[in-house]
Image (cartoon, grey):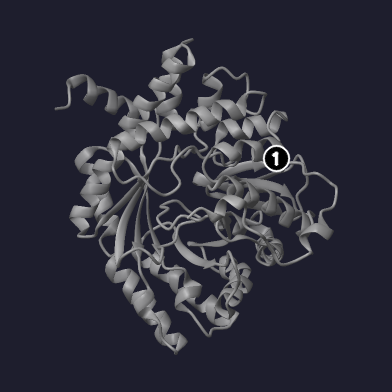
Amino acid sequence: MLSRDDISETINMIREENLDIRTITMGISLLDCASEDTTRLCDKIYDKITTTAKDLCRVGCEIEKTYGIPIINKRVSVTPISIVSQNRDSGDMVKIAKTLDRAADTLGINFIGGYSALVHKAMTNADKALIDSIPEALASTSSVCSSVNVATSKTGINMDAVRLMGTVIKKAAYLTKDTDSSACSKLVVFANAPEDNPFMAGAFHGVGEGESVINVGVSGPGVMARAIEKAGKCDFGELADVIKKTSFKITRMGQLVAKEASKRLGVPFGIVDLSLAPTPAVGDSVALVLENMGLEMCGTHGTTAALAMLNDAVKKGGIMASSYVGGLSGAFIPVSEDAGMIAAAESGALTVEKLEAMTAVCSVGLDMIAVPGDVSEETICGIIADEIAIGVINNKTTAVRVIPAYGKKEGDYVDFGGLLGRAPIMALNSRSCADFVNRGGRIPAPVHSFKN
């Protein structure tokens, strides 16, 4: 039974500390939509999505009113499009992307994920066609998100795919140069991509999933920052307990919403993603959480250790609150979406190199980082390869969402508005890695991949 204090505390978290459900994401299988005719394929995809998710937004709004819990986004993820679109060229793939965008508009959702390819070992013709089409697809749609999985701990790193993604990212940046290269904010390159991730831009409906599923992503950096601030100068053992207890409360709210959405929509409940997902709002920041742990500014020495402790304690508390935890689950550190990260990057305390070190102990990776528009394709490939290697070696999910802002240089800004926020253009190492990334082939899997 909830006590009066528990209810009062939750109300305060929502009103004062930016607690919310970041997203209810419905995963939808498109495997039964396959057709030799592209027009027929697009019609079947549109009908399947708009029929299956027709009540998603309505139910989300009803749950908000019933429980008083803000639900910021309602989204859809679908089976990776390259799997259901065999024997298509890049032009056909763009038609499918526009179909996804039209379905999203009909439903009233903000993003639809799954314009994706899984190429961690090699590429089919359909994979290659989809990857080639990504710049035009993202430039000509508003809601479509794309992801490409280029590595796993079992297969190693497909450097041919990494090299191709350098070209794709640069072209996407150019095609949307009038909007701060915004297409790149909807594109992520993965290692060990999870099949049940509710967050964009990396969400897709995995081939191991059923016909449809409800996955929920929670938020809560503001709540966590306030809890740590209240804890004062306690030791690390006590601090870990504070983080675990707070994570438990946040996750229980996510579990409640997920099960209620599942029941009302008649769709199976999948997972709750525990990730602390920041926003540009002041106070709703993972950087602030770290600073409340005792750092003068995020990025200084000790930041990686603080983030490692935070991430571990968040998972421990969340796992106690839900039997079905999945997705990414931990702490996100996107630059443009986190007011504290933006401030740290502006001051010079937070560099790309320090962010890379931090990704070894947290969820996702180098996320929403704006870099000079004249960066070479090879340097982008090197950034991707470094981050993907961290994921492969550590048997964890890592990713890169980098924005080479066309016409911008270090000291300038990009501004996407809303949850995507704004970010300073960050400096990169000027030395070349071209001869390395142009070798081609596949970096072999690490020795621990042979566990059986």
| Residue 64 in sight in this render | no
81 relative to 360, above or below: below
Q: Nearer the viewer, residue 447 or 31?
A: 447
289 relative to 194, above or below: above
Give percent across and percent down for residue 378: 78, 58
| Picture residue at 53% right of the left edge, 77% below the top | 93
Give percent across and percent down for residue 379: 77, 54
Crowdedness near tag 1: few (<14), some (14–19) or many (≥20) residues, C-alpha within 10 Å: some
Q: Nearer the viewer, residue 140 or 349?
A: 349
Question: Which quarter of the figure has residue 21?
Answer: top left
Image check: 364 left or right of 215? right
235 relative to 13, above or below: above
Which residue is disc 1 drawn over? 352
- Quarter placement of the N terminus: top left
| Picture residue at 34% right of the left edge, 52% below the top | 215
| Picture residue at 66% right of the left edge, 53% below the top | 180
| Picture residue at 27% right of the left edge, 49% below the top | 61
| Residue 243 in sight in this render | yes
Q: Amino acid at mark 1?
A: Val
